[in-house]
Image: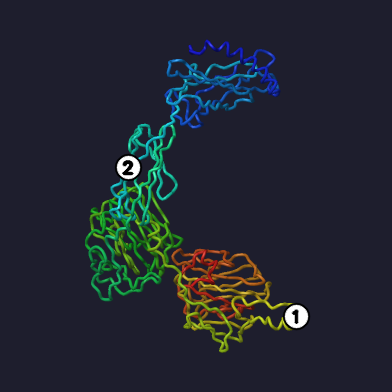
């Protein structure tokens, strides 16, 4: 029997009087005309302390007098048609004080439609460090009550108020100590940090590094220490903050651990492959030198905008590889490798780098895989896991990075500094054999055909930011024409070595503000120049401007743009703004087609007559004052994008296959019959040409880049 049942008759009598008051206060609550059945016993499963802590006969700890909650429900079996049921809650809490006397507090809620969650904010005079028991029962509008929640099959709930916060945690790290002895370990190297508080009731630690989103970790036993692992992604001063949390949810004051993180360790093996033509091996900036077989040709071109001076060409045959005849790293632990590569073809699988395993295969391979019906992809295989991603094109440079992190068994593939694939749960693979450049074991030959340069291997994690820098080829301004009036029909570029020559009577527009000021009958004030004092004026019949030769390599990444004003915002025919090509076709053409109300970019897949074309088009219309139009080809992503007024109007997958030998044309392009046409009628200014792909944010300010 419940020890408090002796009080139930008195409580029920009091509740009957309370019910009359509640019925007057809640007239919408109806009761049955016949026998009134008691409400349902509250389920222990619905009882909580401070929302999150469930009812338990083992006391739960709270930091202050808590809020108790319970779901109460009246029975519907005694309802007449159209009646609703309602229920309130009677809470009781009791404890034994220091003199051995029982103390008790109660609370009765109002009766409302049920089922409903009722709550009681317990009074502030509840004692700390004392076991407080509590239960609850439901009461209906007639004053009938349910059994208490701790009657069978229930249980009595208990809590303890803990008003003392835990002691601050200590932090100990061997790799990254808080001292003044210098710089420790480095970027990409994990360190262990042990948190420990003298307080025996600590159940959690909350920590963050450099103010990042806090993380939580729990010790195996209350009051025990806990160790976490953390890896810095950049060098410099760092701080780690930790707070201990006890079982009541109280936090200690914060402990701050200062550390100075060193630069990341240099590669354990590094071959630039920029050795002079005729060399019989590759010198190493780190690790052993690599011997070169007869099929290796030094002195090959290097990717532009990288700082590399040359690479090696491999022809894909049996003697076309380099090796140090030794392993470059322990592949069972964390490692990374990278290389600049340019495939001569993409129809077969090829390996740029690998390391031999003991079973006659390779533990890992970094290279490319052909894809049926689509562009080839880059690939990083480690053990039984293969990651693929990005678009591989013949003749296009790419920077590849493969990373295995043994700390979390994660495999990652990066192309040109961007992560394109990842995998988790990857088991370590041991490879005690030699590192290979240009071939792999067990890959069906899989030899590289094309160029390879700057091969690096690390025995640490290389963070994303570092990989981005390694694989970055920022766009560089190749030519810029700030078009202003000249007398000889030749417009110099900014550096003075790439003139833009006017043809067909092309001239300049210079607004004559003074004439309008002097003419009292002047009604229409002249429009300003597109940029500066003048801009190029083209009549749409035979006017155009052109360079002496090609300005960009259209087989590589490039960005070309200009500012234009249409003479008529509703032109009656297609007009070409920009083009560059060969004798009878264009590698790219930027035009506007009024019939389709589209900005269009047309790129060709070869210089031969009838070569396939890709049309990239987006809706739009010329504006009355000016339009900035930019085309961006990103060879590394195999994508071409057309921008108008800083916004991408259309984009498509495209892999360039030829370098246009002809000059850059302003205001005309090749037509279907191979002749010139679609002359532009309007103004042109601020022509910019970049080697490399501009980012979307750079396109918005292309005219101001230098």
Tag 2 or tag 1, which sits nearer the N-term?
A: 2
Name which residue lies at 55% across and 68% down: 615
- Disc 1 from disc 2: Cα separation: 82 Å
- Residue 292 location in percent, x, y? 25, 69
**Disc 1, disc 2: CB below 8 Å?**
no
Labelled disc at residue 194: 2
Question: Which residue ends up furthest to the bottom in the rendered image?
Answer: 488
Check the image and report above or below for 69 versus 671.
above
548 on left or right of 530: left
Quadrant location of residue 595? bottom right
Q: Residues within 10 Å of mark 1 (few under 14, many from 20)?
A: few
264 on left or right of 642: left
Q: What kind of colouring is applied to the model shown?
A: rainbow
Along the line of sight, which residue is nearer the eye, 131 or 557?
Answer: 131
Quadrant location of residue 390? bottom left
Check the image and report above or below for 600 versus 85.
below
Question: Which residue ends up furthest to the front in the rendered image?
Answer: 99
- Residue 241 location in percent, x, y? 39, 45
Along the line of sight, which residue is nearer the eye, 539 or 661?
Answer: 539
Q: What element carries label 2?
A: strand
Name which residue lies at 48% across and 76% down: 607
- Residue 114 location in percent, x, y? 62, 25
The residue to which callout 1 is attached is: 522
Check the image and report above or below for 124 versus 239.
above
Along the line of sight, which residue is nearer the eye, 339 or 64?
Answer: 64
Q: How crowded is mark 2: few (under 14 residues within 10 Å), some or many (20 or more)?
A: some
Say if residue 381 shows up in the picture: no
Say if residue 400 shows up in the picture: yes
- Residue 159 location in percent, x, y? 45, 25
Q: What element carries label 1?
A: loop
Quadrant location of residue 487? bottom right
């Amino acid at each position: 029997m419940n020890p408090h049942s002796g009080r139930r008759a008195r409580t029920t009598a009091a509740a009957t009087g309370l019910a009359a008051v509640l019925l007057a206060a809640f007239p919408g609550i109806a009761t049955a005309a016949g026998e009134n059945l008691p409400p349902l016993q509250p389920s222990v499963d619905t009882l909580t302390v401070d929302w999150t802590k469930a009812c338990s006969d083992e006391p739960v700890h709270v930091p202050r007098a808590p809020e108790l909650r319970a779901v109460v429900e009246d029975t519907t079996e005694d309802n007449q048609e159209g009646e609703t049921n309602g229920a309130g809650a009677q809470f009781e809490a009791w404890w034994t004080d220091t003199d051995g006397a029982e103390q008790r507090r109660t609370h009765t809620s109002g009766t409302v439609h049920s089922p409903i969650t009722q709550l009681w904010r317990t009074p502030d005079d509840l004692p700390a460090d004392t076991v407080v028991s509590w239960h609850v029962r439901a009461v209906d509008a007639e004053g009938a009550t349910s059994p208490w929640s701790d009657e069978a099959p229930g249980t009595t709930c208990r809590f303890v108020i803990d008003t003392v916060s835990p002691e601050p945690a200590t932090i100990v790290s061997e790799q990254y100590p808080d001292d003044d002895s210098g710089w420790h370990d480095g970027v990409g190297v994990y360190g262990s940090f042990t948190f420990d508080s003298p307080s025996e009731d600590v159940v959690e630690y909350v920590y963050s590094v450099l103010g990042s989103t806090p993380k939580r970790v729990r010790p195996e036993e209350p009051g025990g220490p806990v160790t976490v692992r953390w890896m810095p992604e950049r060098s410099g001063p760092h701080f780690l903050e930790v707070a201990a949390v006890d079982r009541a949810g109280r936090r200690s004051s914060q402990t701050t651990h200062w550390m100075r993180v060193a630069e990341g360790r240099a590669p354990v093996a590094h071959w630039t492959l920029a050795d002079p033509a005729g060399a019989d091996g590759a010198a190493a900036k780190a690790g052993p030198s690599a011997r070169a077989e007869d099929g290796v040709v030094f002195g090959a071109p290097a990717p532009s905008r990288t700082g590399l001076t040359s690479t090696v060409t491999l022809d894909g045959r049996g003697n076309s590889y380099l090796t140090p005849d030794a392993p470059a790293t322990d592949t069972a632990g964390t490692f990374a490798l990278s290389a600049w590569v340019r495939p001569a073809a993409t129809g077969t699988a090829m390996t740029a780098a690998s390391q031999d395993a003991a079973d006659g295969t390779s533990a890992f391979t970094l290279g490319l895989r052909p894809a049926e019906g689509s562009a080839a992809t880059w690939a990083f295989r480690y053990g039984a896991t293969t990651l693929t991603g990005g678009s591989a094109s013949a003749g296009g440079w790419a920077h590849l990075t493969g990373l295995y992190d043994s700390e979390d068994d994660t495999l990652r593939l990066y192309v040109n500094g961007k992560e394109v694939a990842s995998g988790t749960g990857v088991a370590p693979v041991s490879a005690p054999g030699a590192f290979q450049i240009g071939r792999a074991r067990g890959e069906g030959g899989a030899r590289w055909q094309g160029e390879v340069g700057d091969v690096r291997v690390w025995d640490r994690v290389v963070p994303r930011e570092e990989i981005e820098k390694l694989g970055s080829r920022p766009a560089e301004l190749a030519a810029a024409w700030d078009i202003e009036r000249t007398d000889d029909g030749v417009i110099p570029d900014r550096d003075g070595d790439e003139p833009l020559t006017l043809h067909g009577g092309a001239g300049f527009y210079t607004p004559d503000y003074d004439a309008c000021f002097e003419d009292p009958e002047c009604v229409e004030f002249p429009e300003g120049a597109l940029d500066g004092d003048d801009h190029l004026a083209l009549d749409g019949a035979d006017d155009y401007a052109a360079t002496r030769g090609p300005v960009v390599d259209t087989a590589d990444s490039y960005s070309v743009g200009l500012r234009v004003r249409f003479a008529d915002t509703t032109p009656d025919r297609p007009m070409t703004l920009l083009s560059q090509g060969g004798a009878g076709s264009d590698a790219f053409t930027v035009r506007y087609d009024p019939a389709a109300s589209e900005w269009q970019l047309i790129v060709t897949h070869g210089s031969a007559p009838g070569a396939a074309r890709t049309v990239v088009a987006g809706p739009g219309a010329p504006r009355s004052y000016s339009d900035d139009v930019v085309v961006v080809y990103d060879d590394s992503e195999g994508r071409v994008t057309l921008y108008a007024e800083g916004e991408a109007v259309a984009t498509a997958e495209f892999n360039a296959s030829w370098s246009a030998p002809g000059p850059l044309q302003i205001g005309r392009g090749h037509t279907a019959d191979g002749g010139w046409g679609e002359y532009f009628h309007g103004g042109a200014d601020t022509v910019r040409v970049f080697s490399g792909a501009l980012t979307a944010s750079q396109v918005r300010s292309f005219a101001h880049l230098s």
